[in-house]
Amino acid sequence: MLKRSGSKKGGRGSSGGLLSTARRRGAASAAAVLVVSLAASSPAGAATAPEAPVLTQQTVRVGDRTLAYAAEVGRIPIRDVETGEPHGFMGYIAYRVRTKGPPRPLTFVWNGGPGADSSTLHFEVVGPKRGEGAGLVDNAETWLADTDLVFVDPIGTGFSRPARAEYAQEFYSTVGDVASVAEFVRSWRLLHGAEDAPIFLAGESWGAGRAGSVGYALLKRGVPVKGLVLISGGSGLPAAYGAPELLAALRVADLAPVALFHGRLPPELGRDADAARRNAAAWARETYAPALARAASLSEDERSRIVGELSRRTGMPADQIDRKTLAFGPRAYRTALLGEPAKVLNVFDMRKVADPPRAFNPAILRYLRGALAYHTDLPYLGVEGLRDGFAPGGKPPEGPGARWDYATAPVSEAERAAAMQAAMASGSGPPRLGPPLPSTAEAVALNPDLKVLVAAGSFDSLNSCSSNGEVARNLPTPLKGAVTFKCYEGGHMFYRDQPSRLAFSRDIRALLDAAK
């Protein structure tokens, strides 16, 4: 499966502490020690033997300096705690900088899905290489300048796999996902001698919720989690911090700039995005939220006035607005705004209709198997597909997302079907089945010094900067001191807008400094 390879650029052992033994014996012997130690603890008959991580030495240009670092690619067994048998092998790409003095921060990074690999955050904003055109270039804003990085691919993504087909569903669930990623972080720290490093977790979209819940799980075990970065996936906070009607009404302030962008907003309601947003927010507070609060008792004339004004301020055709609820869902808005069946707004960036595929995907594969020397025949799932490998019987299995169990508690099949149908109709994100797992609020309760950055893009149909702002105003202590909300111009992947990427990188540096 994996072809062994020595380190590039001389192959010497200055791995920046990637393995605790590497400090004494060099990278090559460290890899051998890891193989021996893992193999010794692996039960007889395990489905796949653990493999050595691959270490290389790399450099990146950051500002006016060259940053030298060690890169490591590998997979860690996720073991049944009772038997020691691996049930899955979770892949990662790690980057660490050798320093003297106290340990550097260590940030574990993943995307969402569920069922997404980590390449979007890795190669678009966080890692030492960034996709540009059809290739990869040095990322001058890489977080590696301030924190060591471990990019995590949950089971069923990237090079990560269940050890046996029958184990897959253990990982393809909300509860199993959090448990397995928390176990990965625990194992990685132990295997790499990083127990003293301050830990940060960063996740995007579905991965933001994962980060909050994994952070809580690790803190419960005594792991020193210092910060969370929750990107385009909510805050992990209870819904109590703001009146429900106002939080719903403020969504108008997010949609007014979208209508303006597409020429659907009357000029008197705002000639630029800031003015459109301010005017819509004022109307939402003064008129729309009170109307939602007493929607059942409104007269027909009052309903007509609200529907008409809601249409003016969002561009949503009045006949597409539910007169009973005085509302519409994200999917309905994306479909109806431009008035043409072939022109549906992009779910991740409502400025767009289509989102072309990434031109630098082939460069990612060359980088992983070439520059980082991870010579495996496994498809990197997410950049490559299940059809790129062997499928017994000739039919590739469904991916994790199609098989995901969203339930956090026992539910009936009728409840499951109803939740899935409601989520599909709304288009506002995954279904909610069962109580939410402990997340950001519970993590802050365990560590009041925890620092949390909640980031969202202003043109993302799955998030609301305006509602986030209202939540921030209503946070109690100590959440107010722990959680910072930021809104960036852009979509779900707002860092694709260069000014937002630069601002986001500055905010990450501030978060790391604040958590010291």
Image (cartoon, rainbow, N blue to C red):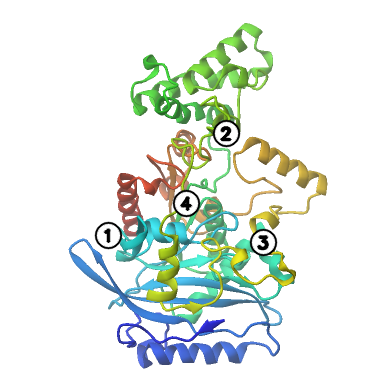
* Circle 4 residues within 10 Å: few <14, some 14–19, many ≥20: few
* Circle 3 residues within 10 Å: few <14, some 14–19, many ≥20: many
Residue 140: which disc? 1
Identify the residue shown where x is 49% and y is 23%.
314
Task: Identify the residue position indicated by label 3 in the image.
Answer: 172
Give the structural element (helix, strand or loop) at label 3: loop
Task: Identify the residue position indicated by label 2 in the image.
Answer: 330
**Mark found first going from the N terminus, 4 or 2:** 2
Task: Identify the residue position indicated by label 4 in the image.
Answer: 357
Give the structural element (helix, strand or loop) at label 1: loop
**Amino acid marked by disc 3:** Tyr
Give the structural element (helix, strand or loop) at label 4: loop
Identify the residue shown where x is 68% and y is 77%.
80
Residue 90, located in which quarter of the rendered image?
Answer: bottom right
**Mark found first going from the N terminus, 4 or 1:** 1
Mark 4–mark 3 CB contact (< 8 Å) = no
* Circle 1 residues within 10 Å: few <14, some 14–19, many ≥20: many
**Amino acid marked by disc 4:** Pro
Q: In which quadrant of the rendered image does the C terminus lie?
A: bottom left
* Circle 2 residues within 10 Å: few <14, some 14–19, many ≥20: some
**Mark found first going from the N terminus, 3 or 1:** 1
Mark 1–mark 2 CB contact (< 8 Å) = no
Residue 133, located in which quarter of the rendered image?
Answer: bottom left
**Amino acid marked by disc 2:** Pro
- Between the residue at mark 2 and the residue at mark 3, the CA separation in whole angstroms equals 26 Å
View extreme (top): residue? 301
- Between the residue at mark 3 and the residue at mark 1, the CA separation in whole angstroms equals 35 Å
- Between the residue at mark 4 and the residue at mark 2, the CA separation in whole angstroms equals 23 Å
